[in-house]
Amino acid sequence: MKIDHDRLFKELLSTFFFEFLALFLPEVVTYVEPESLTFLDKEVFTDVTVGKQYEADLIAKVRFRAQESCFLIHIENQATAQSNFDRRMFRYFARLYEKFALPVYPIALFSYDAPQRLEPNCHQVAFPDFEVLCFNFRVIQLNRFNWRDFLGQQNPVASALMAKMNVVPEERPRVKAECLRLLATLKLNPAKTKLISGFVDTYLRLNAAEEQRFLIELGRIEPVEQQRVMEIVTSWMERGIEQGRQEGEVALIMRLLKRRLGTITPEVEARIRHLSIEQLENLGEALLDFSDAVDLVAWLEREAA
């Protein structure tokens, strides 16, 4: 299954925006008014040279502390290595600066596993006798951070992003356990806990052998923290069972419908896949009375009402 990196990182960073700044750019937090934070609607930029559209990941508007003037913080998550990324950062900066007439603090977050080469933090235009432009931006390159350096950070973003730092394959079970141990100490509300635990589980999906080592690592955690971690792991298992059950119900319903009604359009199939387990069970009984696809669509319309 393809991972929606942009959505996962946007959810994490928008929920824990100041925690992200505090972890990687603590000096910025000292001059930002926390109550002033607002996120701007997505900004889409067209690159006429290649005919593509790019959407800026996260743009926040904040106010300088004890001042009326504002500035923008632009965070661009890059999940794959890309040549000329520095040029794209400058293009974003120039267009945001032109549109909003506000200072822009640019941050590039590199979240891919490889390569681990040091990424550039500036875009230059220069001649042998004259430097026209030197545009600088902040770089946070996760694969060049050692996850062990963040074990003591009481920060939810550290708990999540350790999963994307420099982790050798044999350390994956331990890193996952440490991410959850740190999460357990933070005592976040259920929604925020679910967000981070889901992030960790997505990027540290373990195979059977790794799962065994993961359970051994859990056994080394302090009893109080271990109980909370096991609650998180149990919720993963329950969601997995529920998801597996739903997928099985959908597969069975689709076979029965195709046998009774013939071909099902992709649009109708998509609607069926979004039904709850209870609705799928009800559909399994109702389909026995269907004469054609019109009856099926009518049933779906009644369920949606």
Image: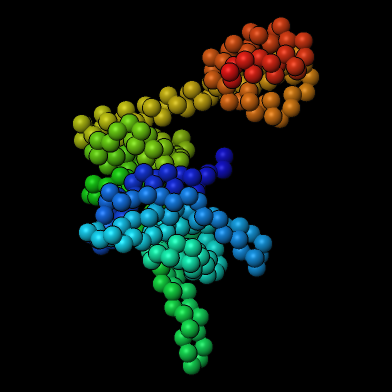
The one of 197 and 216 positioned closer to us in this rendering:
197
Examine the rendered structure and indicate whether residue 245 appears above or below residue 114: above
The one of 62 and 48 positioned closer to us in this rendering:
62
Examine the rendered structure and indicate whether residue 35 appears above or below residue 224: below
Residue 89 shows in this picture:
no
Q: Position of residue 210 (x, y in %)?
A: 42, 39
Q: Position of residue 234 (x, y in %)?
A: 37, 26
- Quadrant containing the N terminus is top right
The one of 205 and 106 positioned closer to us in this rendering:
106
Which residue lies at the image location 69% right of the left edge and 25% below the top edge? 268
Q: Position of residue 149 (x, y in %)?
A: 27, 55
Examine the rendered structure and indicate whether residue 302 appears above or below residue 103: above
Q: Position of residue 156 (x, y in %)?
A: 30, 44
What colour scheme was applied to this rendering of the protein? rainbow
- Residue at the extreme bottom of the image, as rendered: 129
- Residue at the extreme front of the image, as rendered: 68
Which residue lies at the image location 44% right of the left edge and 78% below the top edge? 134
In-image side of 125 versus 145 (left or right): right
Which residue lies at the image location 51% right of the left edge and 65% below the top edge? 95
- Quadrant containing the C terminus is top right
Residue 103 shows in this picture:
yes
Which residue lies at the image location 48% right of the left edge and 67% below the top edge? 98
Q: How many marks?
A: 0
